[in-house]
Every structure is written in C-alpha cells, then in structure tokens.
Amino acid sequence: MPKKILFHVLLFLTVVAAFFSWYSVDRAIFAEGASDFWVPLGWFSFFAVMLSLSIVLVRKRVLLWAAFFVSLSVSFFFVHSFLHLATVALSWVFVYAAQRSIEEDIETSIKIHLMKSLHRGIFLVVIAFVLMISSQYYFSIRTLESERIAPNISKGGTTSWVINMVLPRISPEFQQVKSDEITTDEFLGEIYETIIKKEGEEIKNKLESGASSLQKDQAEKMIENELGRKLTNDERKQLEAFESGSSLKMPSVSPQIKQDIIREWKKELSKSAGSEIKGDEKVSDLFVVIMNSKIDELAEPRAGKEKSKVLPLIFTMVLFLTLIPLGSFASRFWTGIAAGMFWVLRKAGLVSVVTETREAEVIR
C-alpha cells in the first residue's frame, strides 16, 4: 500500500509541477517584473525530477502515459491555439521515447546505475520541454504588436553573471572585476591599454629581429602604420632608444591620446545605445542599454503599428536554440537529484532493489 500511494503521489506532483512550469513561462512572457529565468528553471527542474522518478518507479504504463499527456496538456490553460496540440503530441512522443530508453537501460543492466540510465533518456525530455516552451512563447506573442514582442533585458542577476563571464575574454585584467563595479571609462581605458600593449609587443619583436637594417624614417613609418596615428615625442625617443640598442622598453601610452580615443569610442557607443554615454555608467548597465536598444530597433515596425509575422518566429527560434544547451546543462543536475531521491526512498524502505537470475541469449 505505501508503494501504491508513493506512485500516485509522484504522478500527482508531476502534473502539479507541469502546471506551474507552464504558468511560470506565461508570467515570464507577460507579467511586468516577473523573473525571466530562475523561477521557470526551478519549476522545470522539479518537473523533470518528478517525471524521471515516475518513469523509474511507476509500473502501470497506461497510467504513466496518461500522466505524460495531462502534464503537457495543462499548457492549454495559457495557450489558446489548436495548433499547439501538434506540439503537445510531438512532445509526448519524445517523453515516451525517453521512458523507453531509460527502461531499456535499467532492464539490460546487471547492476542498477540510475544516473547512467536516466542520462540515456533525459536529453529527449529536454527536447520535449524546449518544444513546449517555444510553442507556448510563439502562440502567446504572435498576435502582439512588434513593440510588445521584443524582450526587455533586465539589469543585474543573470545578465551581470553572463557579462562577468565575458569580461575576462576581453582582457585578463578583468578576471577579478565584476561588471557592476567597473565604470565605462575604466572599461574602455583598460581595453585601450591592452590594445597598445599588444601592438607594442609586436613592434618590439619586429625591431628586435631587424632593427639594424631599418633606417629611422622607415621604422617610424612602420610604427605609425601599425598604430594608425602619428608618433608622439616620447614615442620617438623610445624609437631612437630601440635603434641605438640602449633600451627595449615598449612605447608608453600617451594620456592625451588615450582620452581622445576613449571620447571617440563613447560617441560610437552613444549611437548604439540611443542615449549619451558619459563614462560613469557601470559596464553591466552599458551592455544592457545597448542590447535593449538593438532589440527595439529590430522590433520597430516599418509602418505605423503593423504586426510583424516574421519577428515572433525569429525570437522563437532564438529562444529554442538558447534553451537547448541550457537544458542539456541543467539535465545533469536533474538526473543527480532524481538519483539522490531514489537513494533516500530506498533507504526509507519505500523502494526495494532485488537480485534475480535471468537467462540471456549470447552469440558464440
């Protein structure tokens, strides 16, 4: 009896988790200020774990398949399109295929390795989830005006985390710097110094390898071509030191030229952002403003308030391609949590693992 209750509880929790998963997607699409990442991720993680445990433990296949269909169909509370039914059917096929793959691995294994078995089918579950989310998103936004379709990237949270991952790739100096702690002027200044340092090292290598055969005018012209500007007096003195062999120091960064270039860069950034960039803005805010400006340009209607038929499809494809790798990464944690819960249920005596003798065909 306890096992029977457990199985029904698992199926019930699977359906409940599914409902709140689709609800969180609906809120992320329409509700102002709603979380656009963490809340849906939490609900879909719960959904995936309950679904995985149901596949492993529930033996009544018809009941299990019905639970699959109900879990996917509750999305119709938020999507009012008959065409969405095709996505539900296709997603059900993927979940069914995942169930068969997991069961086959368990049945053919000599010893139970639940994480390995779940890993065999979890990616099919990810595809089913992504198809459902993309379909719900598309049918929810396709009738909206272009301005309302464009997503608005929020400051902080996930955005700051992504930017903090990108900054060290721009310059190693940003390895320990957070995007919400560095200003635009500091960011651009560091980029400028990184560029000058790299160019200086290249010029130094050229001079070291062939300085004896270079005349002063030729060397000066080559360096000016590399930098894209005229040399300063300090840099000419450095060049003379190179030629005489008395120094191998790289040209110093001229503060005035640095400020002029940063000023020009800020003008270009202001054009991209659609507003003046003063330099005291945090880098994370700068990236958000520019990305939102570009998205708004893409979503801007070409004639009055016309609705774009292509734009919803474009954003849906972007969403689909974004969620596939994200879901694949998250699925590693889902299988681990499901395996951990199975271990707890086994220790509690609600689930048992027994050893039995099997006959198998072999080729000799």
Image (tube, rainbow, N blue to C red):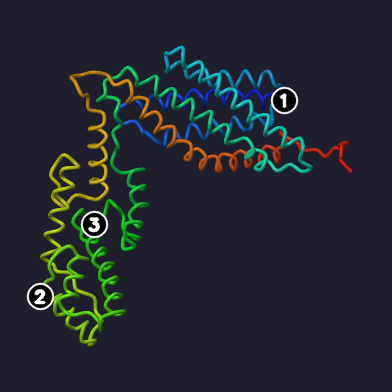
In the figure, residue 237 lies in which quadrant? bottom left
Q: Which secondary structure, mark 1?
A: loop
> Pointer 3: what residue?
187
Q: Residues within 10 Å of mark 2 (few under 14, many from 20)?
A: few
| C-alpha span from label 1 to label 3 | 59 Å
Which label sits on residue 59? 1
User: Closer to the observer: label 1 or label 3?
Assistant: 3
Residue 254 placement (x, y as % from top left):
14, 69
Residue 263 placement (x, y as % from top left):
12, 55
In the figure, residue 226 lies in which quadrant? bottom left
Q: Residues within 10 Å of mark 1 (few under 14, many from 20)?
A: few
Residue 317 placement (x, y as % from top left):
41, 30
Q: Residues within 10 Å of mark 3 (few under 14, many from 20)?
A: some
- Left or right of residue 153: residue 259: left
Q: Which secondary structure, mark 2?
A: helix
Q: Earlier in the sequence, mark 1 or mark 3?
A: 1
Q: Earlier in the sequence, mark 1 or mark 2?
A: 1
**Quick check: marks 2 and 3 in contact, CB under 8 Å?**
no
State the residue at coordinates (50%, 37%): 327
- Depth check: 1 or 212 in front? 212
In the rendered structure, which amino acid carries the disc numbered 3?
Phe
Count up the numbered dots.
3
**Quick check: marks 1 and 3 in contact, CB under 8 Å?**
no
In the rendered structure, which amino acid carries the disc numbered 1?
Arg
> Pointer 2: what residue?
233
State the residue at coordinates (72%, 37%): 105
208 over 163 or under it: above or below = below
| C-alpha span from label 1 to label 2 | 83 Å
